[in-house]
Amino acid sequence: MKNLLLLLAATATVGVAQAQTVLGTAQYKGYSKYIKAVDEYVPAPGQFVNALPAYEDGDDAAAMAAKCTAAIADDKGQFVTLGAYGGYITFHFDHSVANVKGQRDIYIKGNAFANNSEPGVVMVSKDVNGNGLPDDPWYEIAGSAETDRPGEVVYGYEVTYTKDAMNAVPWTDNKGGSGVVERIGIHKQEYFPLWLDSPLKFTGTLLPKNAVNNGSDERPYWNLKSYSYGYVDNLPNSDIDGCSIDLSWAVDADRSPVDLDAVDFVRVYCGENQSVGALGETSTEIAGAEDLHLEASVDAQGTASVATFENISLADESHYMFKPADAENMEYYEGAITSGRYKFSATYMDYSGYDMWTGFVVANYTDNVYAALDDQFKNAKGGGHKSANYAICYASGPCTVDVQAGEQGAVVSGFYVNNSAWVADAILHGDGMSGDGYTGTDGFRTGDWFKLTLTATKADNSTVTKDVYLADYRSESEADHYYIADWTWVDLSDLGAVKSIAFSLSSTRNGQWGMTTPAYFCIDDFGGVNDGSTNGIAHPAVSGGKAPVAKSRFTVDGQRIAAPQRGVNIIRMSDGSIRKVLVK
């Protein structure tokens, strides 16, 4: 009873007392409350490492993460060990988990029981850059250790493990400590994770040792005391409140509260560095996780379903490209950029120092002048449709949008489209390449066209297509010739519910090696609404197709320059207007 009263007092002190949490529905609008997949599995050495899950010769990090997914995703309920201090696992759901104020948000299962707590610290992250990878800032869920054991928590703790094959694994820390992860007789396998390199270093919050010997040195009887709340594998799974976290408990590196509306990734790491006699190292295990309010998460996601690309943080006059931080030369990488409920494909290759990319990039350039390849991320208008950011697609490779809306997909209302600045320049002045009946300086003529084709895939794998002419000079009447040079609405509601949309480009301008018109187009407000600011693609976006282009460029003191120059450039357009552009 005394322990119970202490627990209630501690809970009331930190203001986390809540109504009893109950588990909600498993499916809602095609989404699941359970873990979808494991992104990373990086355990520290331990007696169950290479066994839960089992390592096999040739397994790499991706293979081991897949084995973890098979063990704990979709409520499989098997166990994954994290090893000693610092070992971690990262996972995600098929939706963003909303922070419902006043309620616990995520229930995470371990294998704790009375007097056998092996607490794991929880971290959460929001996919701010929208690339679908756990590479954004992380925030710790502040559990009760500071309240339960004031002044004993160690922040900024760092430990390094060094492999000593088939022996106890030595470690050192940044506090002058050292020791070993002892081998336990019944576990005969290698304790150091065989797919990871040595040394292995972890940094995080170190919880106070929770092991108490209630026996004697000769006949030890160990109790591993639990904390009040906020950790994984800390309390029995039957204690739903005790095994659940509130996203409102998130703090930054300075221990300041962070206001998160939702999170996309969850990471759990072992928070104890202790060896407990014959029990061996304290090692967090995880058996699954659930979104405690799936309906609220999905409905909240629906309110932010439009891809405005404003979730991608950009400096002024810049762009964001999917580019793995550890990209190796000549290696091909596939990724994505997420905005709203849509995932936009992206690929990357480091070609001896040059960025080779296809798919989507997010940008916010405000001028529409194309003078060199560095201008490839600009659009024919400059700026986004109604906000700063927009997306540009280079469709020489995979160029798809996945609709993240459950098994049946969803109706995509439409999107705003625009030509890139490069395409607009090629239409007016030629693309610099020669083809059948034209030279590189010939702009579009009667009979020419540039077309975007959308192929939508439905839940039953059937497809439907839609063509959008980004430039149309097919008419014999020059008055009917046009190209898109402003944000123009494309209605997709007639396609019905779709799972994905693939994009491809074609043109009448083709040379020996294929299309010579630059394979770019721009989009914004994907899944948004037609605000009537344009009349749709059936009409010229600019009367007669005569969009203003740069005719001359000057410095702020009136000196004419031949090419963009760092600083403020004054540009005289073909329609007589003057634009001021900052070149970085």
Image (tube, helix red, strand yellow):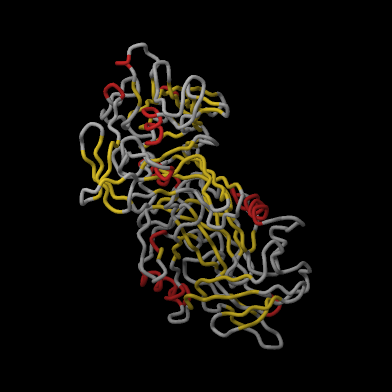
Q: Up-down: is 435 above or below 103?
A: above
Q: Which of the 4 quarters of the picture holds residue 137?
A: bottom left
Instruction: Choose between 194 and 372: the one closer to the eye.
Output: 372
Give residue 228's position: percent from left, percent from top.
47, 70
Residue that lies at the very extreme toward the bottom in this rendered image: 217
Q: In the displayed structure, does residue 411 sit left or right of residue 364?
A: right
Q: In the displayed structure, does residue 523 sit left or right of residue 233?
A: left
Q: Is residue 493 visible?
A: no
Q: Is residue 46 visible?
A: yes
User: What is the number of callouts on the image?
Assistant: 0
Give residue 158's position: percent from left, percent from top.
54, 75
- Residue drawn at (33%, 12%) of the image: 477
Instruction: Choose between 279 and 481: the one closer to the eye.
Output: 481
Q: Up-down: is 224 above or below 455?
A: below
Q: Up-down: is 497 above or below 97?
A: above
Residue that lies at the very extreme toward the top in this rendered image: 476
Instruction: Choose between 48 and 429: the one closer to the eye.
Output: 429
- Residue drawn at (55%, 36%) of the image: 397
Instruction: Choose between 18 and 371: the one closer to the eye.
Output: 371
Give residue 406's position: percent from left, percent from top.
50, 37
Give residue 22's position: percent from left, percent from top.
46, 53
- Residue drawn at (57%, 65%) of the image: 233
Q: Which of the 4 quarters of the picture holds residue 472?
A: top left
